[in-house]
Amino acid sequence: MDSYKLLFTNNLIAFLAIFLASVTMKYFSGFDAEIGSYLYLPIGAKILVFLLFGRQVLPGVMASCIFCGVILFGSWGGNFVWGAVGALMGALAPLISMWFIQKLKMIDFSNLKDIDFRHILFLIFFTAIIHALSRFVIYAKSEVFSISPIDFLSHYLVGDMLGGIVVIWTVLKILPLFVSATNLSKV
Amino acid sequence: MSYIMTSMNIKQFVSHTLISLMMVAFSRVLISGLDSADFVIGNYLWLPIGAAILSYLLFGFKTFFGVFIGFALATIILKGSFDAVSIFSWLGRLSSSLAPIVAIMMMRFFHLSDFFDSGKVNFAHIVFLVILSSLVSTLAKFFIYPINEATISNPVVFIQSYLLGDVIGGIVFIYIAVKVFVPLMVKNKLI
């Protein structure tokens, strides 16, 4: 029973983390599925929750991607199926990247305590490439979206890299500083 | 003594450059039968990327000119004359020559791999290097080629064929080379 409760809580945290990142991105830079964004924060949140909780949070990530993609951003081009498939690819891209990197024994993401920050940076870059290419193929094949290939790929690649770095840098490097400062002030 | 060392280094540099040049040019000419008439569809067995990667892994980045000249030589042979090669074709060859360097530098910068574990080739890491080089090379070509008058009519097929061709060609070339050529070169003290 406790394990189900933990699974539900982790999925809820994943859902909320991506939702929060999506709302922040919409507030700061806006988002259009056909152009992308130069600060795609949700990719950072997705990578982070997969690193923290593993693939068990996939349902929460997928639900959040569909909810944010289709309802919050309205990026479904009038076709729910293609909109959902594009959103789901956003959920799967970090997982595929991590699985692939681990399968070839490049990096071990299971022990986060000893992980090299450069490894996380590389994961962001690799995920950005996989995410941008997969979304491009899906959107171009769907013929629901009207996309300019060069603009689409350049926006998605740069946006994913910047968004990923900003979120993970903030969570791993800046938040602990605030937490330790708060703890010190309590003492 | 230093004169002999310099002479040895030059001799080694020239031999490494020539080996790289021959590997790239020969592999490019070898697959010319699989080329498509439309440049949007890439060759599905792009062996030269494997030759370029292997050259950099065995001899270092100093063989860049050998790799680039190998690509250039093969292109001139296949097109028939120097004038028949467009500036965009040169840029494409340049990106093919540079992509493995970028990928190797990325993997070293991010502390991913040195590709050799106690003198033995780590094939899994080299497969990853091939995939990363293919991604870099395909994306570079994708951003270079549309500058040409003949814009890419089907970008999905372009990315799919170039990426797949690079990955398959790279893995096939390196697998054969590691099993056949490298032991031969070690035996003849070329590396």
Image (cartoon, coloured by chain):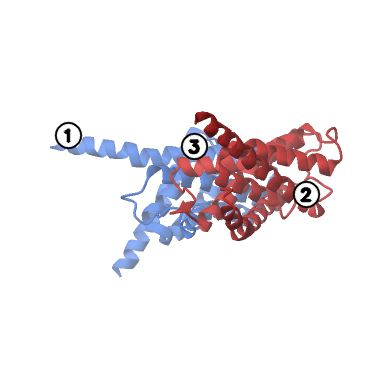
Pair 2/1: label in front: 2
Amino acid type, residue under disc 1 in the picture: Ser
Q: Secondary structure at mark 3?
A: helix
Which chain comes out red in the rendered image? B
Pointer 1 chain: A
Q: Residue furthest top?
A: B3
Pair 3/2: label in front: 2
- The image's mark for residue B29 is 2
Question: CA–CA distance between discs 3 and 2?
Answer: 41 Å
Res A33 visible? no
Q: Residue at x 32, y 62 (%)?
A: A6
Question: CA–CA distance between discs 1 and 3?
Answer: 33 Å
Which chain comes out blue in the rendered image? A
Discs 3 and 2 carry the same chain letter? no
> Which class describes the residues within 10 Å of circle 2: few (<14), some (14-19), or many (20+)?
some
- The image's mark for residue A162 is 3
Among the two numbered marks 1 and 3 on one chain, the one whose residue lies closer to the N terminus: 3
- The image's mark for residue A41 is none
Q: Secondary structure at mark 1?
A: helix
Q: List x then y, in percent, for residue A182.
A: 21, 36
Q: List x then y, in percent, for residue A114.
A: 32, 49
Q: Judge left or right: residue A131 versus residue A115.
A: right
Q: Nearer the viewer, residue B180 or B94?
A: B180
Q: Nearer the viewer, residue A20 or B115?
A: B115
